[in-house]
Amino acid sequence: MTVGRHRIGALPSGLRRRATALRIQIRRSGRIVRLTARNGVRYAVVRVRRRFVGTARRDAMDQRFATRAADDFVTELGNMKGVMMKAGQLVSFIMEALPDEAQQSLSSLFADAPPMPAETARRVVIEQLGDAPETLFLDWEPDPVAAASVGQVHRIVLRDGRRAALKVQYPGVGDAISADLNNAQAMYAMLSMFALKGLDTKGLVDELRDRMGDELDYRIEARNQTEFAEHYRDHPFITIPAVIDRWSTGTVIASEWVDGLSWSQFMAVADEEARRRAGESIWRFAQHSIYVLGAFNGDPHPGNYRFQRDGSVTFLDFGLVKRWSPGEWQRLSPTLDAVIVQRDPELTMAEMEKVGFLVPNHGLTAAQVHAYVSSPYVPYLSDEFTFTREFMQATLTKMIDLKGPHAPVIEKLNIPASFVILDRVVWGVSALLGKLEVTAPWRAMLMEYQTGAPPATPLGEADRAWRDTRFGTSQ
């Protein structure tokens, strides 16, 4: 490639780096532009054809479009790694509103990305740890056991006989992420194909920029994981593997090996009680982290969990962690309290205006606003509720239906940047509960964290006993 009259190799090092970054950005941006254009044309064709067919045919055409778009989306993002793949994961909760075929395609964003060659991973280990993995460890498996958006995981055996997981970052993924973030507006224009009407794209880009910047530095992830592991030490149903500092650097991180079932394996063998325990464990991990720890894993997808047969859960991957800045949660929580605790439409609208969900003089009524924003929180407005895929599908369809009864609210609603990752957790955890079909007294359980109410379930009692023992008081 040339810049002006100069080939990149002939440029000074600083200019060479910038030219290389520009080349990467152009290449990756081109893929997104082509992806958006392809599906824009497909959608336009479908819109025209729908006018001339009956309702049944229109539904079939919509399903085919959604499935083809999802396949295209996954093919591009799964191979691009970095921000593009992570962005797909962050908004993947919307797949619950899509046809089964499209859901199956998008679910691969949760699974393994295409791995880097074994020799490439080996070279990263040599560069970071000073010697070949076959020399450093008793055993090194060159084929990864998992591959995700930023790095892939290899199984190793340490010299003292302990089994461990070594996560190795993809070379060059930092340049790819920088290119993606520099072209972030185009990226979210692409995601608008999936009807994310209410997103403040600039706020979302800024939030993702901060989180992805952290995720590139495995030293930050190691500190996050260590903090969570220490906080949840000896917990009765939540496990977090310890980091092994000796073999952790900026692009390599080692942690204790965890045996367990993957999501698909667990779902194939779990009975109702195990699914209930798993669902409540995931839910309580999120709530305790948000309300008590003040830091929470912003990436609740099935690939980040390992399950025991009884439903106990081990939580993995702490690269995408959101921490409340001073006063941030205090600004957001009154809106949730108005919806769930007070159940007051007027108060809900007033609090949403204060925090920036709605701008002044928006012209909506309190009833309109409350009917829309309370939809995801229906499980917390009754004494007992069963999460189902049907509930999630109906709710998400309602939330993104730009032509439905809530269209006036969708048009006016903004999602503040500080709410972006929390929103992802709310929807992500709810989607998992829908797949697990968990029945529980969710309102009473939430009141444990919001108001300090007594435990509402046996797991709540176990959690409260652990908190009393671990911290000397019920936090």
Image (tube, rainbow, N blue to C red):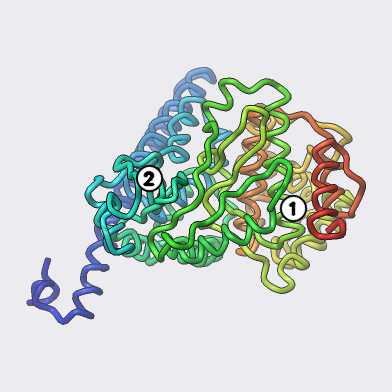
Q: Is residue 52 visible?
A: yes
Q: Residue at 54% across / 31% down in the picture?
A: 261
Q: Position of residue 345 (x, y in %)?
A: 86, 52
In the rendered image of this protein, does residue 18 appear above or below residue 62? below
CB within 8 Å, label 1 to label 2? no
Front-most of 5 and 10?
Answer: 10
- Say which of marks 1 and 2 sits in front: 2
Mark 2 highlights which residue? 154
At label 1, which amino acid type do we have? His
- The local crowd at label 1, few if under 14, some if 14 to 19, many if 20 or more residues have their Cα within 10 Å, is some
Dot 1: element: helix
At label 2, which amino acid type do we have? His
Horizontal arrangement in the rendering, residue 89 relative to residue 146 (left or right): right
Residue furthest front in the image: 160
Mark 1 highlights which residue? 288
- The local crowd at label 2, few if under 14, some if 14 to 19, many if 20 or more residues have their Cα within 10 Å, is many
Q: Position of residue 213 (x, y in %)?
A: 46, 66
Dot 2: element: strand
